[in-house]
């Protein structure tokens, strides 16, 4: 009889995005993505999609360089959180408890083998909309905004890492994630991994950083309701002058219908179709993609844009079309005062 | 600290639908719904949607009257199954082990307070498509059929019951389901319940049987990818002369985008939009709808068709448009030989 | 050899909507419908959808009662306009030339047998967007707004009339419209007509006014890109507290995927799926629907809401759910000063 | 006062596609595209989409090489046809009358400056579906098939030509087409043209043949209802092993949401979203795209596949992925007997 799976984590809760252009990034997330501001503190603004049940899912923080500050998983219960903390303690990956943040209670901080900061928490603040944002149906967190892309909820994020296998083992062994799909090269090197703790086919992904730099970020994804909504998002990004890197198209891996853009701070942001594909099998058998299979391109044959394989934040090498290239001079400015955000 | 939730069941696995018109029902599920036959045994044909990972999700059985034979949940592990069996033993709801069926291993049978048969199992057969049904992408169970409505996967089912509260307590206490939404009348009577063991907002629902008859069935639902696909399904049902009872429209409860038809055997079948709305919160707070709120009709104001509240299978009283009224004479025929199915 | 069809009119150009609640109506069309203001004069505000090529397609005019002021067709050329004027002169339907209005040149005014005012014009002003509304693609009139329902362009309008046959003959003989569909009752009475001068399957419709009142208005329709967009519009109307009278659903007649709401001034407004169905045949054979066929309800079986057959503007009798019932007292206010519109 | 536009042609009626693999091509159009056979004669099979009102819109003819046999426009009336014939007589482009074909009456044949055969006709046969293909709604030509891609109707076609300007003048002067969009290079060379006789934004297009070969064909396009339907078509093409050359994506020119594949005979076939964008202005101002603007790629930034600019039928040079390369040997077979088609 197989050992039972660990079921202690419920879902990706939020992530912190670092931006050297906080004003422009904030306008992007509110006006173009259609998100709602739900708090401010220090150098950070807290944001949410209309179907996110917690107070926020995105913490946007002014910083010298773009990148990811941390990401966080909500545990299924206080007991489940404590089991994960017990497993991490003295593992070398544990960093210790924090007092929490706007929107959630005490969190246990750890870091993966690549140095990304990962937070675990259970106590959270359910979003309580102000009167003008009350929804018509009480089973919905917030009124549908009718603004820009109208992103629904945080879906997943993707980090770059030097050693995918080491990271896979960390997330499997210490946090109980299931590996739903992966890419394994001819020489046995693991090149990418997609992992889940929920019925979504992945809650996060890691892909190999070819520059050998640790701790970088690839993209964060917000979900839309249908593939048609992703196409409409492309129209809206185009109208607003947002750089579209790739898509809309369908990944062979996970069959995600994707659209990648760069937000003004230089971070890659994805909108994707949510939820039609679920992993209901509790004993899902990992899908392994070979080097040869990956060379076929995306599901319908499109070749993947070069920058998709090289560009991450903070940037190490720049793709030709990345807005950061032209805007390099501005990135030396550190915005330390949120009063200047509007 | 709250007690931890029970997480032993993974998802609704399959259901058995009884039909007095097996030939016509089979043609409906294959030609109109776009399902695939994956086995036959005795008086039953086994069917599946293209994204169902198990061998079948629908067992269609010839019978004197329409209705539901049993439904089944897959456990998350063998250990989880045994925990549920231990809880049920001597509860009065337990009926005992069966040897399994086409497509799955030993199952523990029980019955809810209303007498519906519920099966629990873990061992299952993953669908292995024949060459002509192999998908282009290996993370998909079967080729997209391109036939009729092209239903994706089993989504949920809905039973009628005389005492909703008793059934809620049974599914909460013995099987670990979470109550995501419910209707409670002014006098405190529970009139309907929606319950989940996965991240779907419900894996099954029960609504009150106003006729006072026990053990009846309301509908089974297959999922489609988008609301636009549900509209196309309505066109296809219309072209094929299938009786549309209600929809396409949006329920206020659960926000399901629904379309209800009657299959030739007289059972209500739904196609609905899948997955955009997920319940990620591990401690979801039950949404309670009042009598007054229900009187507002569906989300966009449509009044619910009368027969939706009265018609179930086996039928007790017939709505005006139900095909069974005209076809009453045929229901006395028991089809005992599957050779006649084509 | 059949006589050649008259091809002098190109399309429905604009219509004037009267509202006793000009502020609320204007906010509805801009914030909820996603239209753009493109001019003001006297008691009127001029509005447009993002794909309308002319300066405006809706003239919203403050008035004591809701209803329709006039509607206008653009001729295919100056010569074509003059041919229609020559035909109308001394017909008894002619009212004479006007100097034009904001956005278009001289117009010839006439009235149909029911007394609705109809304007013909050729000279028009092409919309010239301000910098912030310039589209990314130069073959588009205006930037996609990303606000509310985002209606695309004026599609058609629908008047009520006492004598449909007399109106049909007027539009066929004097203006050259083709009758694409109609409803003819058992006693030979024409009950409704759909007429076209373009490849759209209708540019306007008339339905019988059972109250025997002349000159009333049924609805104006703006087009969306897909049926999925109409569903999203329903969500947005619901969130904004807009009264939904009927839909989304599919008409059997013309197969329009419809959604009817009441704007704050009390006029019925439709959003519908545009353009997939075109009438390309130059000699299209009129589809005649019988009384019996109409009793089947809409395409997918929904029964038509009673108020859809009785309510028009100005109102004569009120349906139970019409907002005007509750708001009757306010309609005695004539808003004469546009300064109060915001 | 400007001269009046010529309005003698109503729409693209049908086209003849030549295929060296008639069996495979026929299976593609019926099983994958979802078209219906409506006649056979000689080496040809006649096919139609479910919303085509004429008996056929595609004549598939067995031939040694792939390519286009002829295409045909239906006139608005017999008188309009005779006016066009009178204009063409003695023009040097006229080839004379034919007796007609399956589905239509006498046709006047001419050729454009590049040598493509163009047919004009008025008398036509309206499609009369057999009982099993009767639609539920009588304003529809045929039952929705529920098979494969379910293409709706013929939308447009695209030829290659050596001298675009000469062809533009031919279609403007002799046939009365309006130029809705064009590409003009820096040196003044016209590189592509999109022309319309209906309210569709184009009924056909011509693009420059860089090989200097006359009379070649680029693609034929069938319309679908929405962009979401085009995405589903991509899934279905992928599942059926059909080579996808480009898309789904949005052209900047005409904003067509496109998907290009190669049918088994080697001809490029497109499915595209229909009708949302209409040209209602009778005096539409031609959109001129410059060389620089074209270099930006498609609407959302995708670079156009090289083969899209070079591959046409009959082939002169082959793109790497064209199935004809591998299957070159078979193209020498002339299929002369339709009995072998199945």
Image (cartoon, coloured by chain):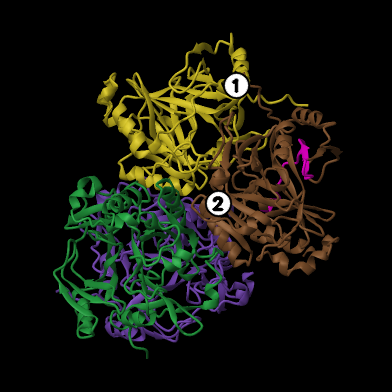
Chain colours: A green, B purple, C yellow, D brown
Between C32 and A315, the residue placed more toward the observer is: A315
Examine the residues drawn in magenta and state their main secondary structure.
loop
Question: Callout 2: 10 Å neighbours few (<14), some, many (20+)?
Answer: many
Distance Cα–Cα, label 2 vs label 1: 37 Å
Percent across and percent down for residue A319 are 44, 62
* Highlighted range, magenta: D112-132
The image shows residue D170 at horizontal and vertical percentages of: 74, 35
A31 or A305, which lies in front? Answer: A305
- Quadrant including the C terminus of chain C: top left
Q: Quadrant of residue C19?
A: top left
Position of B51 with respect to D143 (left or right) is: left
Q: Quadrant of the N terminus of chain C?
A: top right
Residue denoted by label 2: B238
**Protein chain holding label 1:** C
Label 2: chain?
A: B
Does B294 sit above or below residue A75?
Answer: above
Quadrant of residue A210 within the rendered picture: bottom left
- In the image, taking residue C269 as reference, residue B173 lies left or right, namely left
Residue B53, compared with residue C329, is above or below; it is: below
Q: Which mark is residue D323?
A: none
For residue C331, say whether it is visible.
yes
Residue annotated with mark 1: C175
State how many labels appear.
2
Q: From what the image shows, is residue D242 above or below residue D175?
A: below
For the question of whether residue B191 can be seen, the reply is no
Mark 2 vs mark 1: give the one in front: 1
């Amino acid at each position: 009889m197989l050992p039972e799976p660990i079921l202690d984590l419920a879902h990706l809760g939020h992530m912190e995005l670092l931006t050297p252009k906080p004003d422009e990034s904030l306008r992007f997330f509110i006006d173009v993505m259609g998100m709602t501001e739900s708090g401010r503190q220090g150098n950070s603004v807290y944001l949410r999609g209309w179907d996110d049940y917690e107070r926020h899912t995105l913490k946007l923080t002014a910083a010298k360089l773009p990148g990811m500050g941390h990401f966080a998983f909500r545990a299924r219960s206080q007991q489940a959180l404590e089991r994960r903390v017990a497993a991490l303690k003295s593992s070398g990956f544990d960093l210790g408890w924090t007092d929490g943040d706007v929107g959630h209670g005490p969190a246990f901080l750890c870091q993966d083998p690549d140095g990304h900061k990962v937070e675990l928490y259970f106590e959270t603040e359910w979003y309580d909309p102000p009167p003008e944002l009350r929804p018509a149906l009480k089973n919905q967190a917030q009124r549908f905004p009718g603004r820009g892309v109208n992103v629904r909820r945080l879906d997943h994020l993707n980090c770059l890492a030097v050693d995918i296998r080491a990271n896979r083992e960390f997330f499997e062994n210490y946090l109980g994630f299931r590996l739903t799909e992966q890419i394994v090269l001819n020489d046995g090197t693991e090149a990418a991994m997609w992992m889940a703790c929920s019925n979504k086919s992945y809650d996060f992904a890691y892909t190999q950083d070819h520059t050998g730099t640790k701790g970088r970020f690839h993209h964060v994804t917000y979900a839309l309701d249908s593939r048609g909504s992703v196409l409409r998002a492309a129209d809206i990004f185009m109208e607003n002058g947002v750089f579209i890197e790739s898509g809309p198209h369908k990944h062979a891996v996970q069959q995600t219908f994707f659209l990648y853009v760069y937000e003004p701070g230089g971070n890659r942001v994805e909108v994707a179709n949510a939820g039609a594909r679920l992993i209901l099998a509790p004993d899902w058998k990992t899908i392994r993609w070979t080097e040869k299979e990956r060379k076929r391109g995306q599901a319908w044959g499109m070749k993947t844009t070069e920058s998709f394989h090289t560009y991450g934040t903070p940037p190490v090498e720049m793709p030709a079309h990345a807005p950061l290239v032209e805007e390099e001079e501005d990135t030396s400015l550190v915005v330390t005062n949120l009063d200047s955000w509007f």
